[in-house]
C-alpha cells in the first residue's frame, strides 16, 4: 500500500452510466490509482490514509472535456451573437493576432483549468498555439490533458512562417512526449479551410509517426465546403477521406453538416466524433445528429469548445444540451437518454482519446474522481444519475481528485492561486478595451 492514499467513506457511488448507483460505499485511492471499493460493512482500516467523509455526497468519474481552446478565456464575451464566419474572421482571428503570446496562453489556460476543475472536469483535450505554455499551465493545475498544437497555412502566434508549421509542432511533440504521464501531446490541424491538402497530410503523417492523436475541426458550418482549400471530395468528410486522414486515431470536431455517405465513411474509418452542442447553438452552426451517429456505432463524445464561443466550460451544461437537442431535432424524447450523455462525457471520451485508464470507477483505473454535494434543492430527491444531466451543475462539485492527488477540496482550489490567475488575465484583457 502506498503512503499516499485517500479513503472516502459513506458515499453514494456512480461507477459508470450503465450501472445503478450504490449507496453506503467506501472507495480507496492508492497512489495514482483506484485500489478498491465496497459497502461500508467491509470498510478497510487504513490508518495512514487521508480520510474524506462522503456523507450526502455522490462519487463519480471525473468528466472529460474532449475539445477546448483553453487560452480563449481571454476572449470570453468579446464578440457574442455573431455567426461563425463573421465571429471568426472579423473578431477572433484579429484579436488572436494582436494578443496571443506565451504569457497570455499560460495564464488564460490556467484560468480555464481552474474553471474546469471547479465544475468537475479532470481531463481536457486542448488545441491552440504556443501550446507548450498551455501544456505547462495544465500540468501545474493538476489536470490530465491532451494539449494539441495548432496548424494553419497562414502566419500564426508562435509560428510566423507557415512553411515551418509542421516543424514547430514536431518540436512541441518531442518536448512533451515523455515529460509527464498526465500530459499527452497531440496534433491539431485547424480545419480543411485553413489547411491545404498537403498540410493536412503532413500533419496526419506527423501524428502517425509520433503515435499521438490527430484533431481537426470539420463540417461545422453549412457553407464549409465552399471555402475548403483545393477540395478533393464533394463534402468536408469526403475531402479528408480522399486524403487518407481518417482512422481510429483521428478525432473529428463538430460534424454538424453530414449526409448519409459522410456518416458511413466515418463509421467504417473508426474515427471518433466530438460534439460541442452549446458552441454550435450559439454560433447558429446547427445541431449535430449525435443520436443517429451513436446508433450507427460511431464513438460520440462531447466538449465545450473555447469559452469565446460557449461561453461556459461546465460539462454538466453540455450534457444537458446534448441530450435535449437530440430530442429536439428528432422530436423523440428517447433519442438521447441521459445515460448516453453521461457516457459521452466519460467512457466515450476516454475511448475516443485512447485514455483507457480513465472514464469510470474501476480497480486499477487512475484516481480521477469527483464528489458532488447532492443535498441541494435542485438535486432532491435523487432517484438516479439521470438527474446529473438534467439538474446538475458544476457548482455541485465539492471535491476533485486527479491522479490520486487532491486538487479541489470543499470548493477550495489547492493546485494553484486562482485569485492571482484571474488578476493576471484581467490585466491581459486591458488592451482589448473592455476593462
Image (cartoon, rainbow, N blue to C red):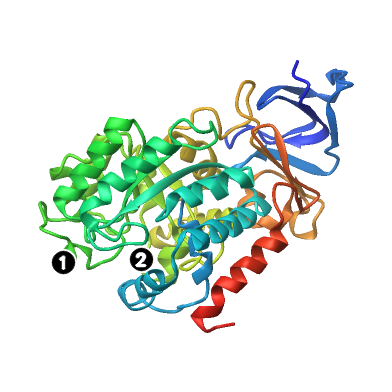
Q: Quadrant of the C terminus?
A: bottom right
- Above or below, 388 against 36 in this view is below
The N terminus is located in which quarter? top right
* The one of 222 and 364 positioned closer to us in this rendering: 364
Question: Is residue 96 rendered to the left or right of residue 404?
Answer: left
The secondary element bearing badge 2 is classed as: loop
Residue 149 screen position, x and y as percent: 38, 49
Note whether 267 is above or below 307 in the view shown.
above
Q: Position of residue 36 (x, y in %)?
A: 71, 21
Nearer to us of marks 2 and 1 is 1
For the residues labelled 2 and 1, the Cα–Cα distance comes to 17 Å
Residue 279: where, in percent of width, then height?
Answer: 44, 64
Quarter of the figure with residue 152: bottom left
Please tell me which residue is depicted at 14% across the width and 48% down the height of the picture. Answer: 198
- The crowd level at tag 1 (other Cα within 10 Å; few <14, some 14-19, many 20+) is few
| Whether residue 159 is situated above or below residue 60 in the rendered picture | below
* Residue at image point 69% right, 43% down: 384
Query: Does residue 338 appear in this view?
Result: no
Mark 1 lies on a secondary structure that is: helix
Mark 2 vs 1, N-terminal side: 1
Res 423 quadrant in image: bottom right
**Image vertical order of residue 88 relative to residue 108, above or below:** below
| Location of mark 1 (residue) | 226
**In the image, is 128 to the left or to the right of 155?**
right
**Which residue is located at x 32 percent, y 62 percent?**
156
Which residue in the protein does label 2 denote? 286
Amino acid at each position: 500500500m502506498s503512503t499516499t492514499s485517500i479513503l472516502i467513506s459513506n458515499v453514494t457511488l456512480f461507477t459508470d452510466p450503465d450501472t445503478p448507483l450504490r449507496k453506503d460505499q467506501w472507495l480507496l485511492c492508492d497512489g495514482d490509482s483506484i485500489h478498491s471499493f465496497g459497502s461500508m460493512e467491509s470498510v478497510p482500516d487504513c490508518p495512514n490514509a487521508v480520510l474524506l467523509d462522503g456523507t450526502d455526497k455522490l462519487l463519480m468519474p471525473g468528466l472529460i472535456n474532449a475539445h477546448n481552446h483553453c487560452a480563449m478565456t481571454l476572449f470570453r464575451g468579446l464578440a457574442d451573437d455573431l455567426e461563425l464566419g463573421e465571429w471568426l474572421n472579423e473578431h477572433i482571428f484579429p484579436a488572436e493576432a494582436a494578443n496571443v503570446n506565451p504569457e497570455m496562453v499560460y495564464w488564460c489556460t490556467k484560468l480555464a483549468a481552474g474553471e474546469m476543475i471547479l465544475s468537475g472536469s479532470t481531463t481536457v483535450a486542448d488545441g491552440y498555439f504556443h501550446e507548450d505554455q498551455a501544456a505547462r499551465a495544465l500540468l501545474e493545475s493538476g489536470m490530465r490533458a491532451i494539449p494539441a498544437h495548432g496548424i494553419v497555412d497562414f502566419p500564426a502566434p508562435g509560428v510566423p512562417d507557415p512553411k515551418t508549421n509542421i516543424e514547430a509542432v514536431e518540436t512541441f511533440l518531442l518536448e512533451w512526449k515523455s515529460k509527464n504521464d498526465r500530459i499527452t501531446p497531440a496534433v491539431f490541424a485547424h480545419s480543411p479551410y485553413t489547411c491545404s491538402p498537403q498540410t493536412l497530410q503532413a500533419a496526419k503523417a506527423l501524428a502517425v509517426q509520433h503515435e499521438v492523436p490527430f484533431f481537426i475541426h470539420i463540417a461545422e458550418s453549412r457553407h464549409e465546403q465552399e471555402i475548403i482549400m483545393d477540395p478533393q471530395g464533394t463534402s468536408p468528410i469526403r475531402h479528408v477521406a480522399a486524403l487518407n486522414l481518417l482512422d481510429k486515431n483521428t478525432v473529428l470536431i463538430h460534424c454538424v453538416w453530414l449526409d448519409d455517405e459522410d456518416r458511413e465513411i466515418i463509421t467504417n474509418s473508426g474515427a471518433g466524433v466530438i460534439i460541442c452542442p452549446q458552441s454550435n447553438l450559439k454560433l447558429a452552426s446547427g445541431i449535430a445528429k449525435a443520436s443517429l451517429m451513436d446508433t450507427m456505432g460511431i464513438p460520440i463524445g462531447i466538449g465545450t469548445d473555447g469559452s469565446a464561443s460557449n461561453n461556459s466550460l461546465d460539462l454538466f451544461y453540455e450534457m444537458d444540451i446534448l441530450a435535449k437537442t437530440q430530442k429536439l431535432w428528432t422530436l423523440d424524447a428517447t433519442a438521447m437518454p441521459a445515460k448516453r450523455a453521461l457516457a459521452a462525457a466519460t467512457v466515450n471520451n476516454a475511448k475516443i482519446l485512447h485514455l483507457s485508464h480513465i472514464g469510470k470507477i474501476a480497480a486499477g483505473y487512475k484516481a480521477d474522481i469527483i464528489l458532488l454535494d447532492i443535498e441541494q434543492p435542485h438535486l432532491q430527491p435523487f432517484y438516479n444519475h439521470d438527474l446529473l444531466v438534467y439538474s446538475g451543475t458544476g457548482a455541485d462539485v465539492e471535491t476533485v481528485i486527479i491522479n490520486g492527488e487532491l486538487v479541489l477540496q470543499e470548493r477550495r482550489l489547492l493546485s494553484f492561486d486562482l485569485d492571482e490567475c484571474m488578476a493576471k488575465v484581467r490585466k491581459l484583457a486591458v488592451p482589448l478595451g473592455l476593462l
